[in-house]
């Protein structure tokens, strides 16, 4: 699975975003160590604070399928924005060295980084 293919998976998921309140679709595609792809979309709620981010939906879906190690996550968001702090923490639980690809709404790669750079000195399983 190439980076471009992973971004394409996130682009395909984008149409399934449920974001009637913010009108700000975010979609993600997470590549597992075993080569499987799990997608996620933001899922909003009339009780706004219950919204779940796309990245966390992808992680939850993957873990529920038995995957716990990941190499790369592609995120598609307007202007190629970066994952929120809560999602960084949840991703860190499983793959601190995760590569993160941020693509814009056209599927163009805007920035590539790693979770270690986005969440330095993280609190994780080894901190306990
Ligand atoms: N959102 C995500 O899905 N991921 C992020 O990392 C940041 C924000 C969603 C939540 C909400 O549905 C919308 O974007 C606006 O905040």
Image: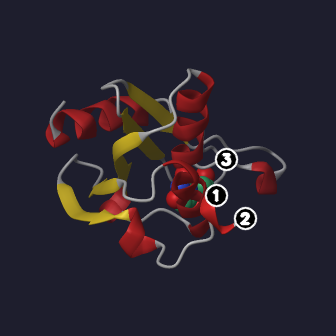
Give the SS element for disc 2: loop
Q: Which mark is residue 125?
A: 1
Could you tell me how far apart the alpha carbons at marks 2 and 1 are, in whole angstroms? 6 Å
Q: Which of the marked residues, 3 or 2, is nearer the chain's N terminus?
A: 3
Question: Which quarter holds ligand 1?
Answer: bottom right
Task: Name which residue lies at 45% across and 32% down.
Answer: 39
Q: Is residue 23 visible?
A: no
Q: Which mark is residue 52?
A: 3
The residue sitting at the bottom extreme is 121
CB of mark 2 within 8 Å of CB of mark 1? yes
The residue sitting at the right extreme is 47
Q: Residues within 10 Å of mark 2 (few under 14, many from 20)?
A: few
Q: On screen, 91 above or below 121? A: above
Mark 3 sits near ligand 1, with its Cβ under 8 Å away: yes
Identify residue for label 2: 128
Give the SS element for disc 1: helix
Q: Nearer the viewer, mark 1 or mark 3?
A: 1
In which quadrant is the C terminus drawn?
Answer: bottom right
Q: Is residue 58 visible?
A: yes
Q: On screen, 93 above or below 118? A: above
Q: Residues within 10 Å of mark 3 (few under 14, many from 20)?
A: some
**Horizontal and vertical percent position of residue 72:** 32, 46
Q: Residues within 10 Å of mark 1 (few under 14, many from 20)?
A: few
Q: Quadrant of residue 18?
A: top right
Task: Name which residue lies at 58% across and 31% down.
Answer: 63
Foreground: 72 or 4?
72
CB of mark 1 within 8 Å of CB of mark 3? no
């Amino acid at each position: 699975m190439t980076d471009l293919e992973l971004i394409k998976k996130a682009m395909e998921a984008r149409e399934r975003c449920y974001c009637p309140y913010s009108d700000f679709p975010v979609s993600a595609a997470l590549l597992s160590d075993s080569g499987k792809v799990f997608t996620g979309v933001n899922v909003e709620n009339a009780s706004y604070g219950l919204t779940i981010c796309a990245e966390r939906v992808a992680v939850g879906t993957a873990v529920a399928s038995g995957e716990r190690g990941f190499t790369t996550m592609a995120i598609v968001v307007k202007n190629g924005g970066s994952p929120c702090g809560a999602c960084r923490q949840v991703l860190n639980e499983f793959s601190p060295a995760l590569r993160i690809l941020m693509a814009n709404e056209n599927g163009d790669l805007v920035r590539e980084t790693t979770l270690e750079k986005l969440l330095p000195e993280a609190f994780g399983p080894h901190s306990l």
